[in-house]
Amino acid sequence: MAKYLLLKHYRGAPAAVNDVPMDKWTPEEITAHMKYMQDFADRLETTGEFVDGQALSPEGTFVRYDGEGRPPVTDGPFAETKDLIAGWMVIDVDSYERAVELAGELSAAPGADGKPIHEWLELRPFLVAPPTISE
Amino acid sequence: MVDAALLQTLTPEVIGVLGRRGADFAAAEDAVQDALVEAVRVWPDDPPRDPKGWLVTVAWRKFLDATRADTSRRNRELRVDAEPVPEQGDAVDDTLQLYFLCAHPSLTPASAVALTLRAVGGLTTKQIAQAYLVPEATMAQRISRAKRTVSGVRFTQPGDVGTVLRVLYLVFNEGYSGHVDLAAEAIRLTRQLAARIRHEEVSGLLALMLLHHARRAARTGPDGQLIPLAEQDRGQWDTGLIAEGVDVLQAALARDRLGEFQAQAAIAALHADAQTAEETDWVQIVEWYDELVRLTDSPVARLNRAVAVGEADGARAGLAALSELDPTLPRYTAVSAYLHERDGAPATAARLYTEAARSAPSVAERDHLTLQAARLNTRLRG
């Protein structure tokens, strides 16, 4: 088994096919979208492939160390940040092919006019523990 | 305290008893898990005189309760008598049959691993979930799907030892992720299997596991960093495990039915036999890799063979062996970096180490490769 992160971007991914911002959808379309995501996660749990799913607020703060005895410096949010993560799902699957298949399904979540968004999801493999037997 | 090891050992035997009394595998396995939970609750205050008898009684009652509930739900008559049918056969075979069932070829590797750990290993779903870093609900579903997949398989059907060994190998190679020591569990299950069946490759796998487990303390530094074989403190190797591994392997090899696990164990034994890295018998190791390539035709074996050729006949020969392989193989670039450094080309090696780090499949390997690149780059600057 291998774990993969399915990364959903607010910004930074190539444009979706059905690229209408969510605030232009009808409430029913938003509800249908949410239900699709939830059903997808539920189904992955029954197949034994679900690990985690979270959504993130688009507004965040940058923080850095500012030297001994001083409070951390904060900055942002930066409106011009190119890459903005919207959320993720972590799956544990038998193969890369299965991960691609599931990402494709998730990308088909309905958007405006009830049609699939065809949004781009980023698929990233986890780094794992090294195998016990290596030579 | 409840003797967890005893509960684990008894688990497959009790499942076997229920199976012989007419319970199907899935129901028997559920009932025994329920009985284990009750044992953990009850035994500390009221330890049984006959633990196995206690588990059989409680599991059988759980099975009847579940069957009755199930049957009444479907509004049908009771099909199972409260009185158990006479048992047939002996308990040893039951456990062996469970190994075969849990590694059935119709299961995906991940399902077979999970089912083996639960039904043969007696681990709880929670422990298995923690070992594989997935939520308990996900692991529970994976196990129940696996049970549905094998529900049509007759319990008495003979199985394939090869599939069982592949499952145990996977468990061992997963190593140690914190909550459950899967390597130790794999060794326990392989020992138990070796005690039940005379098979050279079962012995080969057991030897392989023991010889690698012997080096565990020396494999990682204090901060979890990888320490390559050549740099390990051999004083930390467990000589008891090595001696046992070598004995098990020699007995298997003497029966003259070579297989891939025996060949891998032979390579591990040659490493274990060297007092220092310099004393390693690389010529013999290359010969064993030749056997391994012949037996498996595995690209990974060819890659490791190239490393061994580099040690036996010089880096140039190793690079020549490497050049015949597919450069997209995992760890190809890392091997190439190593051989280039040995061949006196540190700049090329540093570049390759950096490249290899980018595609490393684990954090420990990535850090190790980055360290090698940094070491060479520092020397090149200085």
Image (cartoon, rainbow, N blue to C red):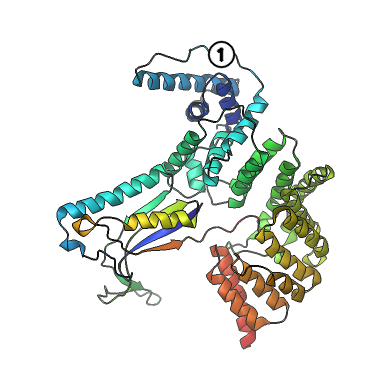
Residue B141 position, x and y percent, is 43, 40
- Would you place residue A103 above or below residue B2 in this image? below
Residue B288 is drawn in which quadrant? Answer: bottom right
Q: Secondary structure at mark 1?
A: loop
Instruction: Give coordinates of residue B367: x percent, y percent.
Output: 56, 69
Residue at the right extreme, as displayed: B254
**Percent from the top left, x then y, of residue A40?**
33, 49
Classify the position of the N terminus of chain B by image quarter: top right
Residue under label 1: B85
Who's the residue at 30% across and 49% down the image? A38
Residue A89 appears in the figure: no
Q: How many marks?
A: 1
Q: Is residue B323 left or right of residue B351?
A: right
Residue B349, placed above or below residue B132: below
As drawn, A73 above or below B280 = below
Query: Is A50 or B212 nearer to us in this picture?
Result: A50
Is residue B193 rendered to the left or right of residue B113?
Answer: right
| Residue farthest to the bottom, as pictured | B382
Q: Residue at x 75, y 70 (%)?
A: B310
Q: Residues within 10 Å of mark 1 (few under 14, many from 20)?
A: few
Out of A77 and B294, give the one closest to the viewer. Answer: B294
